[in-house]
Amino acid sequence: MVGGSIADLYMTKGQIREPHWHPNAWELDVVIEGRVVVSILNPDTSQLINNPAGTGQVVFIPMGWLHWITPVTDRTRLHLFFNSSQVENAEVSDFLRTPPPEVFQLSYRIDPALISSALAPVKTAKETIFIGPPASGGTISSQTGTGASGDISPMGGMMRSGWATTATSMTQPTINIKRK
């Protein structure tokens, strides 16, 4: 793919690739192993589209559309293709952590103390990409590839293993991006 990016995503049932969108790229998700539901919010109609997909199936996400990925099986692997070599992520967690509580009060009539308490786990994290939910000790990854669990880092031509050595367990979720 000229001018594109490829990501390798491993997850397991009970995790989620947090809601996000790509302002500069469309996304093509190819299920390599397992089953997922790719949920997409149509910005023109506000319709939520849940796309169940299994091994060998493909889901297309238009540029700028909010979406998230939920694994249905214990072992899930996807190849994610983007039509940009510098794909941008707009993470919902970034938008939740940034405004002061008073903005939520003025905009939505949510008590500032209540929203502060509810968003505390998101606001205290320094990471920007969540693959959750966080387990004890946290399962948050960072864009620099130094996260405690999920990892977004250049593949450098090498595929990282996302599976544990036992048949019943899996390593922390990983995302690897290879730019072409």
Image: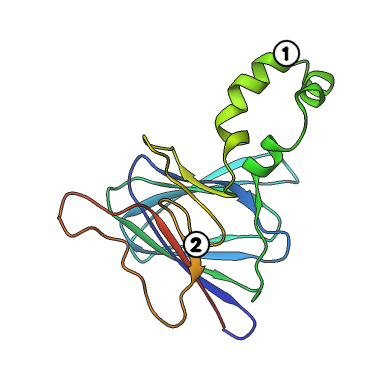
At label 1, the amino acid type is: Asp
**Vertical comparison of 106 with 145: above or below:** above
- Residue located 34% across and 45% down the image: 72
* Image-based side of 67 in relation to 100, left or right: left
- Residue located 55% across and 31% down the image: 121
- Residue located 33% across and 48% down the image: 12
Name the residue carrying label 1: 111
Depth check: 99 or 39 in front? 99
Residue 171 quadrant: bottom left
Tell me the SS state at disc 1: loop
Depth check: 41 or 8 in front? 8
Residue 102 quadrant: top right
Depth check: 172 or 61 in front? 172
Q: Residue furthest right?
A: 106
Distance of label 1 from label 2 (alpha carbons): 36 Å
Q: State the image coordinates of residue 45 (x, y, percent, origin top left).
A: 72, 42
At label 2, the amino acid type is: Gly
* Image-based side of 34 in relation to 83, left or right: left
Q: Quadrant of the N terminus?
A: bottom right
